[in-house]
Amino acid sequence: MDPLKQKFKEKALALFQANRAMLKENGDTIVDQVTLKQVFGGMRGVKSMIWETSQLDAQKGIRFRGKSIPELKEILPKFEGCKEPLPEGLFHLMLTGEVPTDEEVKWITGEWQRRADVPKHVFAALETLPKDAHPMTQFSMAIIALGTESVFNRRYAEGMAKSDYWDATYEDTMNLIARLPRVAAYIYRRTYKDGDHIAADISLDWGGNFAHMLGIPGDDFKSLMRLYLTIHADHEGGNASAHSTHLTGSTLSDSYKSLSSGMNALAGPLHGLANQEVIKWVFKMLDVLGTRNPSKEQIAEYVQKTLDAGKVIPGYGHAVLRQPDPRFTAQRTFAEEYIKNSDIINVIWKAFEVVPPILQGLGKVKNPWPNVDAHSGALLVHYGMHEFSFYTVLFGVSRSLGVLSQLIWSRALGFPLERPKSVTSEWVMDYLAQQKEAVG
Ligand code: HAX
């Protein structure tokens, strides 16, 4: 058994047994109550799922196994000469709860390189799609096509025991994560660069090699990719991409179909596609205003116009957060450190001063602050990636790390098929009438 799998197995067995004992004694303890507002309002805040890899706090933002993003930047191993954390290290942390050593991270990099070969039929499947198919459509389809290799499906058909489900899911997950950069880079190069593909560089790490295969030059872009792939990886379990992956996975669908579900959720403009929408909105504003250097007053006017047209301001607001997103702040810190004087980044920073008071003034927006998607596009544009519709694929490559490491946990902890209860509006009216009658 490989060392990462061995480490996971020990931790998972211990937690499985501890949870069993805890539930035997406390299974009927009430941890939440649900209001009608929550039932009609997208289940906001309802505690109904276990997610081991990360947890979100409305004020402090994301914690990966208790660690904040600035802490991750300190404690996770780095690629030689780079100051940003390696996503391989975060994967280890999420999967085992332990900060990895340099050696452990090197092992993961090597293991993902060893598993990185993409079957030819995946590229052939992609070639059947028109070049202008949205990259998220291509990405989701490619992930499904990779699933013909599923170890879980093969072993399930052979009669695998329930206690081994996590093991087969680990194998699928390691293979899938290893192959995603190659698939994503293929989509980028076929869609925007006339199919002029770039071979992998095995001297590089997972994120650095992804940057290399995309064909965006420079060490700073590789550093950005390492940071980007780390900070987008997980955001506890209730967000739409994580929850979709979790729900599909709960049917014992394989890692490929589960992740593809998650990517379809990520592709919506209220979720991951917001990174594309933000930068489109910014460039449209610059075109309309006829300047690359708008004043705060001009930005405020344009924000108001967007709202008056009945649209949301992309990159602002959040279902859980009530402060500026620490992932926004991490990208801002990166820009301050690596980039001097970029017009487009200056616009993002000015918008950060202008948008929150306007949204606050509407009196209904619960979180007027920027989220992760407000900043990422400007960084990518700065380094020469102008193909906005590809941005959500970058998010998706990263998100695989969190949702798939959790899928291994879900299988190891024996989570059942997810099946909440739904009711009709008529049921609600009848229920309210009965309550009234009972009170007299
Ligand atoms: N601009 C304008 N109005 C906004 C708004 C924004 N950025 N954010 C929220 N609102 C509005 C809502 O549309 C809602 O209006 P109605 O009552 O008229 O329907 C009202 O304020 C209350 O919404 P909320 O409770 O504050 O927010 P929700 O939890 O319902 O929604 C969203 C959270 C992220 C979907 C929302 O803030 C939004 O649409 N933001 C813009 C899109 C965006 O940036 N999405 C990315 C979010 C982060 C993420 O998942 N990244 O992948």
Image (cartoon, rainbow, N blue to C red):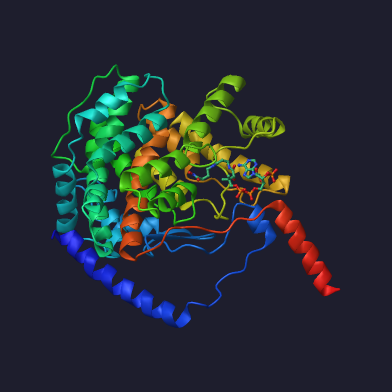
Q: Position of residue 154 (x, y in %)?
A: 22, 48
- Name, please, the residue furthest toward the top: 194
- Quarter holding the C terminus is bottom right
User: Which quadrant of the figure has residue 203?
Assistant: top left
Q: Closest to the observer: 54 or 133? A: 133
Left or right: residue 423 compared with residue 430: left
Q: Position of residue 351 (x, y in %)?
A: 57, 38
- Looking at the image, is 49 positioned above or below residue 42? below
User: Which quadrant of the figure has residue 192?
Assistant: top left
Please name the residue shown 23% across and 58% down the image. Answer: 160
Please name the residue shown 41% across and 79% down the image. Answer: 22
- Quarter holding the N terminus is bottom left
- Name, please, the residue furthest toward the bottom: 25
Please name the residue shown 23% across and 43% down the image. Answer: 178
Q: Position of residue 286 (x, y in %)?
A: 56, 24
Q: Position of residue 5 (x, y in %)?
A: 20, 60
Residue 216 visible, this angle: no
Q: Closest to the observer: 433 or 210? A: 433
